[in-house]
């Protein structure tokens, strides 16, 4: 199976890390607070390791499990340490009232990450449309966007190793619409569906 590094030590890092280990992947944790990284690696068990903040990640796939406004600065701070990696942005840049994006609708955190990432780094948007509780309890579809077919294939294989279904929505220019889907999901949780135990997915009606 694959190797991943989680940059971030919060809820999504814990959930994705747990699923990744169950799926047979090796997991490294990095946090700006080293003690939180050490604690999470210990909690995860399964041979999870920690890396030093800003060092070259051990994982081929680097998941930035950070609040949205930290993602671009942290990728810029890591700089060349991320060269050759596949960086997966999972963030939802919601505005303060959760009814719009925190940035212009003509971009996305993932596209801004691609601008600051070193040459040879591929950026993929994934996981942002899925609430953490559904990742823990269900088998939701995970939509992914990115410009490199090879990088997306690697992320898709990782998603499959978690027991989830990856669905490619296209190039990185689709990332704003995935961020919009994140908003739709929150809207549904508050209105039409009325709870958080669901995920957007694809039903096929063929034949
Ligand atoms: N939770 C969900 O259901 C869900 C679903 C889909 C996508 N997401 C997205 O996943 C990301 C992580 O969510 P979460 O629920 O795991 O959040 P969380 O539990 O609050 O964890 C956030 C992590 O980001 C770190 N962080 C925040 N700002 C940072 C900065 N400027 N520099 C470095 N590290 C920073 C925090 O570090 P410290 O502990 O040191 O502050 C913490 O490790 C978010 O972008 C969110 O939109 C969440």
Image (cartoon, rainbow, N blue to C red):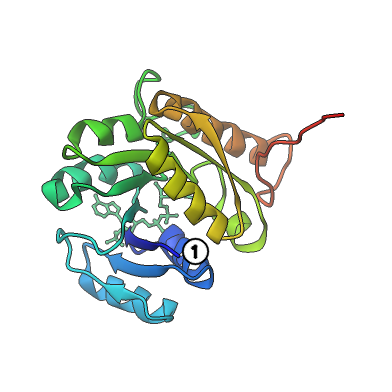
State the image coordinates of residue 40 (x, y, percent, origin top left).
Answer: 36, 74
Residue sitting farthest toward the front: 150
Q: Is residue 172 above or below residue 10?
A: above
Dot 1 lies on which element? helix
State the image coordinates of residue 145 (x, y, percent, origin top left).
Answer: 45, 34
Residue sitting farthest toward the top: 106
The residue at 14%/61% (across/down) is 55
Give the mark count: 1
Q: Quadrant of residue 118?
A: top left
The residue at 52%/53% (across/down) is 159
Q: Residues within 10 Å of mark 1 (few under 14, many from 20)?
A: some
Residue 34 visible in the current orientation: yes
- The quarter in which the C terminus is drawn is top right
State the image coordinates of residue 90 (x, y, percent, origin top left).
Answer: 42, 45
Left or right, residue 102 beside residue 131: left
The residue at 35%/23% (across/down) is 107
CB at mark 1 closer than 8 A to ligand 1? yes
The residue singled out by tag 1 in the image is 15
Left or right, residue 154 beside residue 118: right
Residue in front for this viewpoint, 192 or 3: 3
């Amino acid at each position: 199976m694959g190797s991943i590094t989680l940059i971030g030590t919060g809820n999504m890092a814990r959930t994705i890390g747990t699923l990744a280990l169950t799926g047979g992947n090796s997991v490294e944790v990095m946090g700006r607070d080293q003690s939180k990284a050490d604690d999470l690696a210990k909690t995860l068990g399964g041979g999870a390791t920690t890396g030093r903040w800003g060092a070259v990640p051990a994982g081929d796939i680097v998941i930035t499990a950070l609040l949205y406004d930290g993602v671009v600065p942290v990728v810029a701070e890591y700089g060349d340490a991320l060269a050759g990696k596949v960086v997966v942005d999972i963030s939802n840049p919601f505005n303060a009232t959760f009814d719009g994006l925190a940035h212009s609708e003509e971009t996305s955190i993932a596209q801004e990450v691609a601008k600051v990432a070193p040459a040879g780094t591929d950026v993929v948007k994934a996981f942002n449309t899925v609430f953490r509780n559904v990742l823990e309890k269900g088998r939701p579809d995970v939509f992914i966007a990115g410009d490199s077919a090879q990088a997306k294939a690697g992320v898709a294989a990782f998603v499959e190793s978690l027991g989830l279904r990856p669905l490619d929505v296209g190039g990185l220019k689709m990332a704003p619409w995935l961020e919009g889907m994140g908003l739709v999901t929150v809207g549904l949780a508050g209105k039409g569906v009325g709870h958080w135990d669901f995920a957007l997915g694809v039903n096929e009606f063929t034949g």
